[in-house]
Image: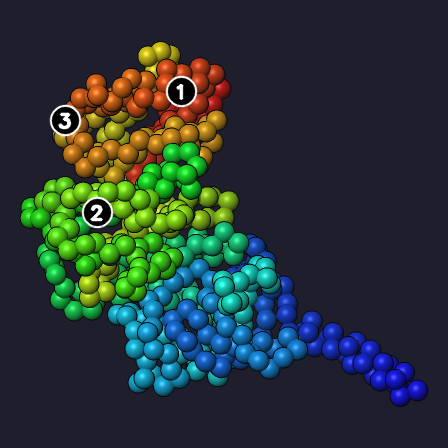
C-alpha cells in the first residue's frame, strides 16, 4: 500500500506540474506586438547574472529546476570581457565590451531582473549556452535587448540560419548605426589611434567559386586605401561577426609588423592557407569564415577592420539593406556573347573614368537570383576610361591577358546556349546591371 500511495502521489504531482510548465511558455510572433511573421516560444525567466553584452544567466520559470541557465543573445556579437564580475568596478575587457555590458545591466535592473526569453526552436544552442532573444520591461512594454544594442551601435550583426526571425531587422539597424558612426562605429571612440587620417575601405568576396569549403582562398577581404599616403597596419586585425581568436587572443586575423596598404592600392586577406606577400595575406582557417547571402533566412555577414586600440576603422556589411544606391549604377553596362568564343563584357557608358575595385561579375546557376557558378572580382588597379570595355573571355590561357582583357581558362562552353543570367554586383551585393538570354530571366 505505501508503494501504491507513493505512485499515485507521484502521478498526481506530474499531472499538476503540466499546467505550470505550459503556463511558463507561450507561442507568439517573434517580434512582440507584431501581427504576423515567424513564431517563437517565449519563456518567463529571472536574470541572475550579467556576464557581458551578449550573455546572461537566468532562472527559467517552469523548467523544473532553480538552477540558472547560460543565455546567449541571438543575432548579435558584442566585444569581449576578460574579467567577469557582478560588481561593475571589477570588470575588465576590450574597448566597447564594458559599455555593452553596462547597457544590458541597466535595462535588466530597470526590469527588476524579470526577462522573457524567445526562440524559434527550443533546442537552439551555441555550445553550452541557450540561444535566445532576451526581452526586458521598459517604458511599460517589453523590448528586445539585442535590438537596443545593435541600434545604438554596441554590437555587430551576427546572422543565424536557424534563429533567423530578426536577421533582416538587425542587419538594417547595424547599417544605420555604421552610417551614423556611433559607439562601435565611431573610428576614434577608444582614443586617438594610428593613421587617423587614413581613408580605408573593406570589401568581401564571400561566395567562392564552387564549394566554398574546398576553395577557402576564394573567400577574401580587400582593404583598400583611398588616400594619398601609404597606411601601415601591422597589429591591426580583420574579423567577421563571429569570434575567431588567434593564439594571442586577438579576435581575428592580425596583420604582421610591416604590413602596409599602399596609397591608392589594396591588400588582400585570403581565408585559406598560402605564402604571404606584401599585398597578399592568408588567414589559414580550417573552414570558411564569411556567410553566404541567403534570402530565405536573410543571412549575411560583414568584414570589420580594427586598429590596435580596438577602434573599428572600416566595416563592410552585406547584403546591403539601407542606402543601397551604388554610384556606378547606370554607369557600367553588361553585354554577353553566349556563342563561341564566349565572353562577358563590362562597358563604361559615362564620360568619366571609373575604378572597378570592389565589383564582381557573376554567372548565375540556372538563372537563380542568389546562386552562382562563378564570380570574377576586379582588382584594385582595374579601371575603365569613358567608353572603354572590359572583356572576360571564358576560354584561353591567362598569359594572353591585357589591360582590358582577361582569359578565365574555364573552357569553351560555359555560357549555356539555352539561356542563363549574368549580373554585375558590388561587394555589398547591390546589383548594378543584369543581362539574360534564352529561357532565363533576370
As drawn, 336 above or below 131: above
Q: Which element carries disc 3, helix, strand or loop?
A: loop
Question: Residue drawn at (21%, 21%), measured in percent from left and top?
Answer: 399
Q: Residue furthest front?
A: 275
Task: Decide if residue 237 is in sight here.
Answer: yes
* Image-quadrant location for residue 395: top left
User: Could you tell me which quadrant the N terminus lies in?
Assistant: bottom right
Q: Residue at x 47, y 16 (%)?
A: 418
For disc 3, the marked residue is 385
How far apart are the two marked residues, 2 and 3, measured between alpha carbons? Answer: 24 Å
Q: Residue furthest bottom?
A: 2
Comparing 268 with 98, the one in front is: 268
Q: Secondary structure at mark 2?
A: strand
Q: Which quadrant of the structure image shows residue 175?
A: bottom left
Q: Around disc 3, counting alpha carbons within 10 Å, would you say few (fewer than 14), some (14 to 19), or many (20 or more)?
A: some
Left/right placement of residue 416 relative to residue 350 reads right
Q: Which mark is residue 223?
A: 2
**Residue 204 position by quadrant:** top left
Horizontally, is 178 left or right of 120 in the view?
left
The answer to whether residue 335 is visible is no
Horizontally, residue 251 falls left or right of residue 295, namely left
Amino acid at each position: 500500500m505505501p508503494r501504491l500511495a507513493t505512485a499515485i502521489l507521484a502521478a498526481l504531482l506530474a499531472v499538476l506540474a503540466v499546467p505550470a510548465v505550459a503556463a511558463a511558455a507561450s507561442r507568439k510572433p517573434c517580434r512582440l506586438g507584431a501581427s504576423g511573421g515567424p513564431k517563437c516560444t517565449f519563456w518567463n525567466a529571472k536574470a541572475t547574472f550579467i556576464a557581458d553584452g551578449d550573455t546572461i544567466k537566468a532562472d527559467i520559470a517552469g523548467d523544473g529546476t532553480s538552477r540558472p541557465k547560460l543565455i546567449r543573445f541571438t543575432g548579435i556579437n558584442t566585444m569581449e570581457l576578460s574579467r567577469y564580475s557582478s560588481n561593475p568596478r571589477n570588470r575588465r575587457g576590450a574597448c566597447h565590451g564594458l559599455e555593452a555590458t553596462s547597457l544590458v545591466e541597466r535595462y535588466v535592473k530597470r526590469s527588476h531582473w524579470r526577462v522573457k526569453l524567445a526562440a524559434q526552436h527550443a533546442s537552439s544552442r551555441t555550445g553550452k549556452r541557450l540561444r535566445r532573444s532576451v526581452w526586458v520591461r521598459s517604458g511599460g512594454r517589453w523590448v528586445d535587448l539585442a535590438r537596443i544594442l545593435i541600434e545604438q551601435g554596441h554590437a555587430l550583426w551576427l546572422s543565424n540560419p536557424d534563429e533567423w526571425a530578426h536577421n533582416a531587422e538587425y542587419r538594417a539597424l547595424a547599417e544605420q548605426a555604421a552610417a551614423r558612426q556611433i559607439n562601435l562605429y565611431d573610428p576614434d571612440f577608444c582614443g586617438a589611434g594610428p593613421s587617423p587620417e587614413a581613408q580605408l575601405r573593406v570589401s568581401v568576396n564571400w561566395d567562392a567559386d564552387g564549394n566554398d569549403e574546398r576553395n577557402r582562398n576564394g573567400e577574401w577581404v580587400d582593404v583598400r586605401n583611398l588616400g594619398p599616403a601609404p597606411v601601415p597596419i601591422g597589429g591591426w586585425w580583420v574579423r567577421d561577426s563571429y569570434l575567431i581568436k588567434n593564439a594571442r587572443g586577438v579576435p581575428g586575423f592580425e596583420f604582421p609588423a610591416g604590413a602596409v596598404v599602399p596609397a591608392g592600392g589594396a591588400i588582400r586577406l585570403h581565408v585559406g592557407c598560402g605564402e604571404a606577400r606584401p599585398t597578399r595575406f592568408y588567414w589559414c582557417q580550417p573552414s570558411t569564415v564569411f556567410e553566404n547571402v541567403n534570402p530565405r533566412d536573410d543571412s549575411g555577414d560583414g568584414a570589420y577592420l580594427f586598429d590596435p586600440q580596438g577602434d573599428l576603422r572600416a566595416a563592410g556589411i552585406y547584403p546591403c539593406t539601407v542606402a543601397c544606391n551604388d554610384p556606378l549604377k547606370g554607369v557600367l553596362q553588361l553585354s554577353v556573347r553566349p556563342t563561341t568564343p564566349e565572353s562577358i563584357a563590362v562597358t563604361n557608358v559615362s564620360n568619366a573614368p571609373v575604378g572597378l575595385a570592389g565589383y564582381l561579375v557573376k554567372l548565375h546557376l540556372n538563372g537563380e537570383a542568389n546562386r552562382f557558378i562563378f564570380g570574377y572580382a576586379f582588382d584594385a588597379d582595374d579601371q575603365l576610361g569613358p567608353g572603354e570595355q572590359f572583356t572576360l573571355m571564358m576560354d584561353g590561357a591567362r598569359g594572353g591577358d591585357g589591360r582590358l582583357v582577361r582569359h578565365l581558362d574555364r573552357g569553351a562552353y560555359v555560357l549555356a546556349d539555352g539561356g542563363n543570367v549574368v549580373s554585375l554586383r558590388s561587394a555589398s551585393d547591390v546589383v548594378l546591371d543584369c543581362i539574360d538570354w534564352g529561357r532565363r530571366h533576370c
